[in-house]
C-alpha cells in the first residue's frame, strides 16, 4: 500500500486515479477536504476495494502515526499543500501552518514509523515530497532554466513556505537517514483543476460570459506540464529515484500568460463558439499582483537521463484535452464553484484597476 496526502486535490487526485488505472496496489488517500480538496474528484473509486479514504489534517501527527501503524505503507507521497500564490498574499498564515508545520508533523510521524520497520522494508521505504519550481525564484529572458542545483530564492509567501518544506525534507534525509525523494514541478494543468488557477479560471469565466483577467501585460512566462505527465513522472521517481535526490519535472513548454489565454480563447472559439465575436473580446488586463515572478522554466534533463521520463503531451494536445474535459463536466465545475469561492474571486479581481 501507498499513502497519498492531499489525494483529493487537483494533482493528488489525478495521481490516485492514474495509479489505480496502472496497477492494483492499494492507496490510502489522506485529505483535509479544504476548499480545493474535493471527494467528487475520486467519485469513480467510491466502490473500489483498492482505495481507502481518511479525512484528516497533516498537522494531526497522532492520527497520521496511527494510520501508518495500522496500514503499514511502503511509501508516503506528500501532495498536500496550500498552493495558490494570490491566496498566500492575502493570508500567508495558512501557508505556514500547512506547508511548513504540516510537513514537519508528517516527517516526524513517518520517521518514527520507518525506524520500526524490518530492515528489508526499511531500505525499500520512500517519502516522496511534491514541490514546485517557484522555490527557485524568477528568471530573466536570457537565464538558463532552473536545474536541481539552482539556489533557492522564493519571492511569495507560498513559494517561501514550499522552500521551507523542501529544506525540512532534505534535513530529515541527511540527519536521520529517512529515505526521501523531492520533485519540483512546473505549472500543472488538466482535469479537476480548481478554477482559481489561470487555465480553469479562463475556461469557466469565458463560458460564463465574464471578463478574462490577465495580470499586467501578460508577458509572464511559465513552463506548462500536463498533469497526467506529472503523475507518470512521479511514478518513475518513486520506482527508481535515488534516495535523497531531487528531480525537476517540466513540460518543456514555456508560454506567456497572455499566449495561454489567447490559445484557450481559440480552442473555445473552435469547440464552443459564441453567437457573436470571439472569447478574446472578454480579455481584461488588470493591475499586476505584488512581487509577480517574471519567468519560470524547468530543465528536466536529469529525470530523462536517469529515469527515462519525458512528457508525452505537447502543450497543444494537453490543452485541447483539458478544454474538452471542462466542456464535458459542467456538473463538477458547478459543484466546486461554491459561494465562498465566488466571494474570493470577487475580492481578488473585481477591484483591480486597468493596467493597460
Image: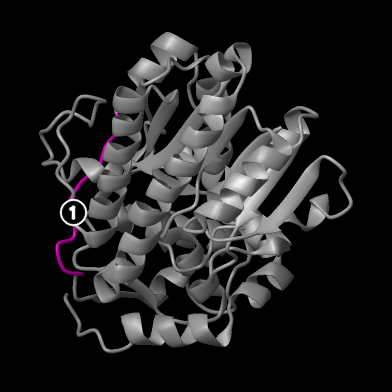
Find residue 337 and report its image quarter: bottom right
Q: Position of residue 201 (x, y in %)?
A: 47, 68
Query: What range of the chain is rendered magenta?
Result: 289-298
| Residue at image coords 33%, 87% | 350
Name the outermost residue toward the front: 116
Q: Quadrant of the N terminus?
A: top right
Q: Is residue 46 rendered to the left or right of residue 234?
A: right
Q: Position of residue 182 (x, y in %)?
A: 39, 31
Q: Quadrant of the C terminus?
A: bottom left
Q: Position of residue 159 (x, y in %)?
A: 26, 52
Q: Is residue 101 visible?
A: yes
Find residue 354 and report its image quarter: bottom left
Crowd rating for badge 1 (residues with CA inside 10 Å; few <14, some 14–19, many 20+)? some
| Residue at image coords 66%, 55% | 325
Q: Is residue 2 rendered to the left or right of residue 255?
A: right
Q: Is residue 46 above or below residue 181?
A: below
Toward the viewer: 246 or 69?
69
Q: Is residue 125 above or below residue 30?
A: above
Find residue 227 and report its image quarter: top right
Q: Is residue 105 rendered to the left or right of residue 1?
A: left
| Residue at image coords 20%, 46% | 295
Tag 1's secondary structure? Answer: loop
| Residue at image coords 35%, 86% | 347
Residue designated by label 1: 293
Inspect the magenta stretch and tell me whether residue 300 lies in it.
no
Q: Is residue 190 visible?
A: no
Toward the viewer: 142 or 334?
334
Q: Is residue 11 above or below residue 36?
A: above
Amino acid at each position: 500500500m501507498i499513502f497519498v496526502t492531499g489525494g483529493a486535490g487537483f494533482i493528488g487526485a489525478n495521481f490516485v486515479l492514474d495509479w489505480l488505472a496502472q496497477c492494483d496496489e492499494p492507496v490510502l488517500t489522506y485529505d483535509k477536504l479544504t476548499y480545493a480538496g474535493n471527494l467528487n474528484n475520486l467519485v469513480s473509486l467510491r466502490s473500489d476495494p483498492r482505495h481507502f479514504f481518511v479525512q484528516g489534517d497533516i498537522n494531526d501527527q497522532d492520527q497520521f502515526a496511527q494510520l501508518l501503524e495500522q496500514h503499514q505503507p511502503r511509501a508516503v507521497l506528500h501532495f498536500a499543500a496550500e498552493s495558490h500564490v494570490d491566496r498566500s498574499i492575502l493570508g500567508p498564515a495558512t501557508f505556514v501552518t500547512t506547508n511548513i508545520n504540516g510537513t514537519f508533523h508528517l516527517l516526524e510521524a513517518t520517521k518514527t514509523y520507518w525506524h520500526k520497520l524490518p530492515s528489508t522494508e526499511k531500505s525499500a521505504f520512500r517519502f516522496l515530497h511534491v514541490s514546485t519550481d517557484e522555490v527557485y525564484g524568477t528568471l530573466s529572458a536570457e537565464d538558463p532554466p532552473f536545474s536541481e542545483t539552482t539556489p533557492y530564492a522564493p519571492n511569495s509567501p507560498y513559494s517561501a513556505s514550499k522552500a521551507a518544506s523542501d529544506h525540512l525534507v532534505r534535513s530529515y534525509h541527511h540527519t536521520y537517514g529517512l529515505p526521501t525523494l523531492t520533485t519540483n514541478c512546473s505549472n500543472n494543468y488538466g482535469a479537476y483543476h480548481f478554477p482559481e488557477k489561470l487555465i480553469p479560471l479562463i475556461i469557466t469565466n469565458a463560458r460564463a460570459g465574464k471578463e478574462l483577467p490577465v495580470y499586467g501585460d501578460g508577458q509572464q512566462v511559465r513552463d506548462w506540464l500536463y498533469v497526467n505527465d506529472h503523475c507518470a513522472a512521479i511514478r518513475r521517481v518513486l520506482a527508481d529515484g535515488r534516495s535523497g535526490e531531487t528531480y525537476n519535472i517540466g513540460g518543456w513548454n514555456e508560454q506567456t500568460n497572455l499566449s495561454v489565454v489567447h490559445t484557450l480563447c481559440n480552442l473555445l472559439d473552435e469547440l464552443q463558439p459564441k453567437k457573436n465575436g470571439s472569447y478574446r473580446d472578454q480579455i481584461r488586463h488588470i493591475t499586476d499582483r505584488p512581487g509577480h515572478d517574471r519567468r519560470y522554466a524547468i530543465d528536466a534533463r536529469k529525470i530523462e537521463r536517469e529515469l527515462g521520463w519525458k512528457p508525452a503531451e505537447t502543450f497543444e494536445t494537453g490543452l485541447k484535452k483539458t478544454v474538452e474535459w471542462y466542456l464535458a463536466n459542467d456538473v463538477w465545475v458547478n459543484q466546486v464553484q461554491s459561494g465562498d469561492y465566488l466571494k474570493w474571486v470577487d475580492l481578488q479581481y473585481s477591484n483591480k484597476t486597468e493596467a493597460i
